[in-house]
């Protein structure tokens, strides 16, 4: 597995967010309608993730997608922003409904508090 935990992000932009974001790299696939695009998670929180697209895509802001993160159950999300090959997605349901992902975030939170 090539994901890792690191310190939470805390710059001014991130301080106004509802959830603490954590550096996290893992492969994922974004499903939209009958299409999909391979991508990589760059950071994650209980509210969403920043994703780097591996190839050009017609993924647009406001679109509902399903984010399939390697080693976790898929989670429904919405594209909140996009700048070139990087986009932000907001989870549409609580990560608590995705036990393995919730456990990962709990570990990040515990490591950040230590």
Image (cartoon, grey):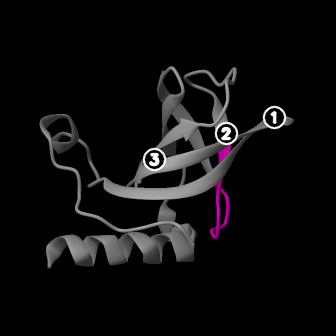
Task: Check disc 1 and report its element: helix, strand or loop.
Answer: loop
Q: Label 2: few (<14), some or many (≥20) within 10 Å?
A: many
Viewer-proximal residue among 110 and 54: 54
Q: Is residue 107 left or right of residue 60?
A: left
Split into 4 quadrants, where in the image is the C terminus?
bottom left
Q: Label 3: few (<14), some or many (≥20) within 10 Å?
A: many
The numbered mark, 1 or 3, whose residue comes first in the sequence reads 1
Please give the label number shown on residue 6: none
Please give the label number shown on residue 33: 1
Q: Which residues are magenta?
A: 66-75
State the image coordinates of residue 112 (x, y, percent, origin top left): 20, 70
Judge whether 19 appears above or below 5 on screen. Answer: above
Please give the label number shown on residue 65: 2
How far is mark 2 from mark 3, CA to CA?
13 Å
Task: Check disc 2 and report its element: helix, strand or loop.
Answer: strand
Q: Which of the two discs, 1 and 3, sits closer to the camera?
A: 3
Instruction: Name the image quarter holding residue 46.
Output: bottom left
State the image coordinates of residue 81 (x, y, percent, origin top left): 46, 26
State the image coordinates of residue 95 (x, y, percent, origin top left): 49, 63
The numbered mark, 2 or 3, whose residue comes first in the sequence reads 3
How far is mark 1 from mark 2, CA to CA?
8 Å
Is residue 2 a member of the stretch shown in magenta? no
The numbered mark, 1 or 2, whose residue comes first in the sequence reads 1
Judge whether 99 appears above or below 5 on screen. Answer: below
**What residue is drawn where x is 67% and y is 24%?**
56
Task: Check disc 3 and report its element: helix, strand or loop.
Answer: strand
Q: Residue furthest front?
A: 2
Is residue 68 a member of the stretch shown in magenta? yes
**What residue is drawn where x is 25% and y is 43%?**
17
Residue of label 3 = 49
Residue 57 at least partly seen: yes
């Amino acid at each position: 597995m090539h994901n890792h935990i690191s310190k939470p992000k805390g710059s001014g932009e991130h301080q106004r967010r509802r959830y603490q974001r954590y550096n996290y790299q893992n492969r994922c696939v974004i499903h939209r309608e009958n299409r999909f695009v391979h991508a990589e998670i760059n950071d994650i929180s209980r509210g969403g993730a920043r994703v780097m697209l591996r190839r050009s895509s017609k993924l647009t802001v406001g679109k509902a997608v399903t984010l399939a993160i390697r080693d976790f159950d898929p989670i429904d999300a919405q594209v909140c922003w996009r700048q070139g090959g990087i986009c932000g997605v907001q989870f549409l349901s609580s990560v608590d409904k995705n036990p393995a992902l919730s456990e990962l975030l709990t570990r990040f939170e515990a490591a950040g508090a230590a």
